[in-house]
């Protein structure tokens, strides 16, 4: 990969200007279309590389650890569980096959079958999520929320500077971006109200978060050192932590957010690997598809201002995550 | 079942005095032994009725909705998902087969194969848990904890009397009773300490809870009315919410309990059905096997004093539970 800083990589796949899916990115996702059952692919330009077809054709024959049906699954879980040495090699192999001067796939008769149009594909939830943890990872966000719900004078609590404050969210209500979210019903009590009322939330909000997906299992009681963190983090998705602020404000003391959050959370369907974010690969350009079309400007602003935060993902990653099976950890990006 | 109040039911299975597993209880569990792969059974006395053998022999032939391999699973999930009309009928059929004067199984040649010794069986986690919610369901407990962590003068917060305060726990660290739990490491900060320290918890505690298991799926955005609750509650287990109070006290503001709880939670392997707790069946005697042998006296005391609470399970059940796939909801029993 380091050569990329000298000679920019080019591909035989046409990549539209401003595409998120350059040859440096190559995220993993799960897709289906009218003809194909759910399977794992890698995005490039307007195409999806159907990994099941590549595997079937023998392009991964030097990777003996890959089960025959590993890409014919409706989630990345089994693939991720193979561990970084294998998943990294698969992505590198695909990158190699997509290089402009590599004939192996470019001139192969299965090329048409292997390259699926992204527009015709339906993206599924990329992983089956066992547990999900939301970290309070930006000092600006923790201070904003502290001022909103508690005391503006003492918005940031003392523990925040010492440990990654976080809570478990509801894993089963995480859905792929684009899924309609119902406005939740619940109790709220404005300061002016004597008693709480029940009804649809009147203060819907969103939080743009960067989520990381871990899938290398640990055993109950094991610890992961910060030095080992990168072997456990498969990749990243964007995460919209939809929030019903009126429900949250009334319910959250003392056990934390609950019904004000668990009615639905959206994630992007393409998982950008940790490798794609390695310093030598930071020529990657991300353009964000906001989850919520009507608030795209606000989301883009939030993300643009978060560059500094994203640009040192290791700082975030090295925050400890509790023992896990398949886990998504998120943290709200600074929005100011 | 109503006849039980007139003529107590008796079984051809010998049931030791003080056994938890009378013909009125008949809980479901998942077991294996040296000879048998994981499968679903019902406990009675010192035996487990192997439901896979009964099904294979044709005892459930009038239940056409039962897939052939439904009892040859390592969790109750698929069985529970069939819904109450089916699961209730299976339990009733087994109860009928176990009655003293019923010859069908008693005198059948497969009787020896169908009745497995409980002592020789290894009990597994009865369900694959997708999400788990811990409710703050006893006023005594909420007041005790409020006094312990906050202000003894205002221990019970205003929302407690209006809604079921709860939070999501870590589903993947729920293990069957008997599994060794590692003492967790974490940060704590006593009032006397200027800065927090990291190390093994020095204030381990437990909470005896009654957990209910739901498994009839709902769709994202659907609501369940309290009137429908019983169609969703399959049954109950005991739940030990192991708690590291020093870690919890430092981390839990403002997002709730996290690492002070998620290092492990123990549940009993036998799921007592809602039907077994119906008023007409309350001749069932429960004797509790405490999770922690060294604190059995305390646990038994806690449970004995909880009778009033248990004896009206509908009151607890009707507290709302968020949309779910497979969910375990618990609430701490009053301990004083």
Image (spheres, coloured by chain):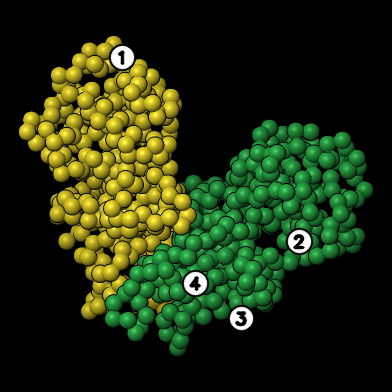
Chain colours: A yellow, B green
* Circle 4 Cα neighbour tier, 10 Å, few/some/many (<14 / 14–19 / ≥20): some
Q: Is residue B297 above or below residue A49?
A: below
CA gap, disc 3 and disc 1: 71 Å
Residue at figure coordinates x 62%, y 46% from the top left = B76
Give the side of residue A137 with respect to residue B71, left or right: left
Marks 1 & 2, CB-CB < 8 Å contact: no
Mark 4 or mark 3, earlier in chain: 4
Q: Is residue A313 above or below residue A5?
A: below
Foreground: A147 or A326? A326
Q: Where is residue A336 shown, x and y percent of the image?
A: 17, 61
Residue on which disc 1 sits: A110
Residue at figure coordinates x 68%, y 32% from the top left = B68
Residue B20 got which mark?
2
Mark 2: secondary structure: loop
Which chain does tag 2 point to? B
Which chain does tag 1 point to? A
Residue on which disc 4 sits: B204
Residue on which disc 3 sits: B336
CA gap, disc 4 and disc 1: 61 Å
Q: Where is residue A233 shown, x and y percent of the image?
A: 32, 46
Give the side of residue B143 with respect to residue B123, left or right: left
Q: Nearer the viewer, mark 4 or mark 3?
A: 4
Mark 2 or mark 3, earlier in chain: 2
Foreground: B18 or A177? B18
Which residue of the protein is positioned furthest toward the bottom in this rendering?
B153
Residue B178, located in which quarter of the rendered image? Answer: bottom right
Q: Is residue B180 above or below residue B28?
A: below
CA gap, disc 4 and disc 3: 19 Å
């Amino acid at each position: 990969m380091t050569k990329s800083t000298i000679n920019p990589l080019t591909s035989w796949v046409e990549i539209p200007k401003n595409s998120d899916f350059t040859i440096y990115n190559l995220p993993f996702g799960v897709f289906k279309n009218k003809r194909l059952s759910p399977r794992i692919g890698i995005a490039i330009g307007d195409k999806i590389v159907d990994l099941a077809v590549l595997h079937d054709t023998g392009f991964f024959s030097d990777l003996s650890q890959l089960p025959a049906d590993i890409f014919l699954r409706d989630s990345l879980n089994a693939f991720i569980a193979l561990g970084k040495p294998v998943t990294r090699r698969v992505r590198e192999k695909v990158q190699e096959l997509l290089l402009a001067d590599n004939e192996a796939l470019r001139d192969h008769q299965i090329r048409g079958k292997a390259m699926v149009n992204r527009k015709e594909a339906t993206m599924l939830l990329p992983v089956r999520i066992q547990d999900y943890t939301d970290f309070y990872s930006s000092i600006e966000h923790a201070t904003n929320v502290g001022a909103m719900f508690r005391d503006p004078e003492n918005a940031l609590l003392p523990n925040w500077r010492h440990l990654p404050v976080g809570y478990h969210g509801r894993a089963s209500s995480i859905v792929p971006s684009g899924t309609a979210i119902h406005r939740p019903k619940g109790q709220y009590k404005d300061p002016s109200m004597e008693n709480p009322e029940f009804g649809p939330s009147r203060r819907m909000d969103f939080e743009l978060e960067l989520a990381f997906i871990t899938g290398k299992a640990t055993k109950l009681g094991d610890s992961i050192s910060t030095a080992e963190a990168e072997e456990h983090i498969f990749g990243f998705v964007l995460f919209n932590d939809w929030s019903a602020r009126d429900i949250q404000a009334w319910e959250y003391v003392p056990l934390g957010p609950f019904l004000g959050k668990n009615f639905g959370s959206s994630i992007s369907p393409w998982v950008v690997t940790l490798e794609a974010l390695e310093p030598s690969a930071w020529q990657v350009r991300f353009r964000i598809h906001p989850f919520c079309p009507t608030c795209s400007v606000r989301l883009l602003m939030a993300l643009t201002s978060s560059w500094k935060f994203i640009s040192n993902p290791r700082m975030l990653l090295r925050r400890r995550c509790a023992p896990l099976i398949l886990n998504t950890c998120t943290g709200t990006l600074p929005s100011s």
